[in-house]
Image: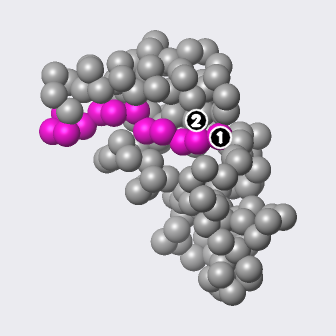
Amino acid sequence: MVFQDLSCFFPVENTLKLWYNANKKEEETGMNILHSIPQEDGFYMPAEFAPHEGCILIFPHRRDSWQNGAYAARKAFAQVIEQIAKSEKVLVCARYDDYDAARFLLPPWVRVVEMESDDSWARDVAPTFVTNGHTIRG
């Protein structure tokens, strides 16, 4: 797995590191892990239509979920991603074996990172961001 620093993409530094290290101890990661729940600190989940800087999508790959080697799904995802990328940043996570296919289908201004996943539904497996109106937590 290749980890790329995404702090320039999202306003929360080390968000994906938190995602990878969710089950590790604080001393193993060297990160400050908060032990309060966000609501206690006045944070809430913004609405899906709230202003935001970008979105995360996962390049389709599971042959058991998509017909014909996921080819049609990949083309459809690429078309959707290209439209989204006209108005906001898009980060696409692609497995190592699928990175070249993602890069080929997507416009050059879309960021693609190598990342293992067993799903294409980023809402279920990607980082979640909360805000208190001034600060963002991931």
Of the residues shown, which amino acid type is indicated by label 2?
Answer: Leu
Of residue 102 and residue 27, the one placed in the foreground of this image is: 102
Of the image marks 2 and 1, the number of the one nearer the N terminus = 1
Residue drawn at the location 26% of the way across and 20% of the way down: 71
Of the residues shown, which amino acid type is indicated by label 1?
Answer: Gly
Q: Quadrant of residue 3?
A: top right
Q: Quadrant of the C terminus?
A: bottom right
Q: Which callout, 2 or 1, points to the residue nearer the camera? A: 1
Residue 26 position within the rendered picture, expressed as x and y whole percent measured from the top left: 64, 75
Residue 111 position within the rendered picture, expressed as x and y whole percent measured from the top left: 60, 28
Q: Is residue 61 visible?
A: yes
The circle on residue 91 is 2
Of residue 50 and residue 135, the one placed in the foreground of this image is: 50
Residue 76 position within the rendered picture, expressed as x and y whole percent measured from the top left: 36, 23
Left or right, residue 48 beside residue 41:
left
Which residue has dot 1 on it? 54
Q: Is residue 30 visible?
A: no
Residue drawn at the location 48% of the way across and 71% of the way down: 23
SS class, disc 1: strand
Label 2 – label 1 distance at C-alpha: 7 Å
Residue 6 position within the rendered picture, expressed as x and y whole percent measured from the top left: 68, 42
Q: Quadrant of residue 18?
A: bottom right
Q: Are marks 2 and 1 in contact (CB under 8 Å)?
A: yes
Which residues are the magenta region?
A: 54-65
